[in-house]
C-alpha cells in the first residue's frame, strides 16, 4: 500500500475482519479511522484496547468531510474495505486523497461501481487482496501474541446450526460466529 506508520488509514466494515484489522493496524503503529454504517460495527471499533482513533458512519452526509478534518491532507492515503456492500466500496473511493489506494478484501457479488473521473483525475488505485505468504502469516501470529489481538465472537450451539445462515446475515451481528461442540 505504500503507507507507513503513523499515517492515518481507514477500515470500512467493522465486523469480524474489520475489528481485527483495526487491532493489527494499531499494533503496527497506524492511526485508524473505523468506518461503518451499523451501530454494532462502530461499537466494536472501540471495544478493545487497540481501538480506532476515530469512528465515522459513512451514511452521515458529512462523513468524508469528518475524515478530511481529522486526518488532513485531503483524506486518507489508504482504506481497507472488508465489506462486500457496494455502497460502502463506492463511498470509500471518495474518502481517499489524491493518489490514495483502496484495498478491497470483501468479496462483492455484484460489480463494483466507481466514479471514473475521481479514479482517473485523482490518480487513485483499487487493489484486491486475498492471501498472505507463509512468512507474513508467521509475522501476523507474532503480532497476535504480542498484543493480545482477539476476535469478538458469538457462540452458537450445535442445535442452532440450522439458524447459521440467518445469524450470519443478521446486520446486527458483532464479530464472528463460532459453533460450540461439546463432547
Image: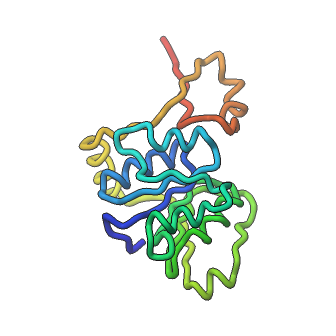
Q: Quadrant of residue 64?
A: bottom right
Give the colouring mode of the picture.
rainbow
Outermost residue toward the top? 183
Q: Quadrant of the N terminus?
A: bottom left
Number of on-image labels: 0
Q: Position of residue 147 (x, y in %)?
A: 28, 43
Task: Please tell me which residue is depicted at 31% across the width and 64% down the height of the picture.
Answer: 6
Outermost residue toward the bottom? 121
Q: Position of residue 60 (x, y in %)?
A: 66, 55
The answer to which of 30 and 69 lies nearer the viewer is 69
Query: In the visual, does 87 lie left or right of 15?
Result: right
The answer to which of 139 and 38 lies nearer the viewer is 38
Task: Please tell me which residue is depicted at 67% across the width and 66% down the height of the picture.
Answer: 90
Task: Please tell me which residue is depicted at 62% across the width and 86% down the height of the picture.
Answer: 120
Query: In the visual, does 148 lie left or right of 151?
Result: left
Outermost residue toward the left? 146
Give above or below for 16 relative to 109. Answer: above
Q: Quadrant of residue 42?
A: top right
Q: Position of residue 75 (x, y in %)?
A: 50, 71
Give above or below for 60 relative to 154. Answer: below
Q: Position of residue 151 (x, y in %)?
A: 44, 37
Amino acid at each position: 500500500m505504500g503507507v507507513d506508520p503513523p499515517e492515518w488509514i481507514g477500515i470500512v466494515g467493522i465486523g469480524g475482519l474489520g475489528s481485527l484489522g483495526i487491532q493489527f493496524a494499531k499494533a503496527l503503529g497506524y492511526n485508524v479511522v473505523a468506518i461503518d454504517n451499523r451501530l454494532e460495527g462502530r461499537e466494536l471499533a472501540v471495544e478493545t484496547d487497540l481501538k480506532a482513533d476515530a469512528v465515522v458512519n459513512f451514511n452521515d452526509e458529512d462523513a468524508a468531510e469528518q475524515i478530511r478534518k481529522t486526518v488532513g491532507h485531503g483524506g486518507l492515503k489508504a482504506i481497507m474495505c472488508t465489506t462486500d456492500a457496494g455502497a460502502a466500496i463506492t463511498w470509500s473511493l471518495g474518502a481517499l486523497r489524491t493518489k490514495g489506494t483502496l484495498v478491497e478484501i470483501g468479496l462483492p457479488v455484484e460489480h463494483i461501481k466507481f466514479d471514473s473521473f475521481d479514479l482517473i483525475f485523482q490518480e487513485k488505485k483499487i487493489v484486491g487482496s486475498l492471501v498472505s505468504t507463509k512468512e507474513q502469516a508467521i509475522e501476523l501470529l507474532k503480532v497476535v501474541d504480542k498484543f493480545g489481538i482477539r476476535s469478538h465472537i458469538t457462540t452458537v450451539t450445535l442445535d442452532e446450526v440450522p439458524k447459521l445462515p440467518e445469524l450470519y446475515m443478521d446486520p446486527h451481528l458483532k464479530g464472528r460466529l463460532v459453533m460450540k461442540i461439546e463432547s
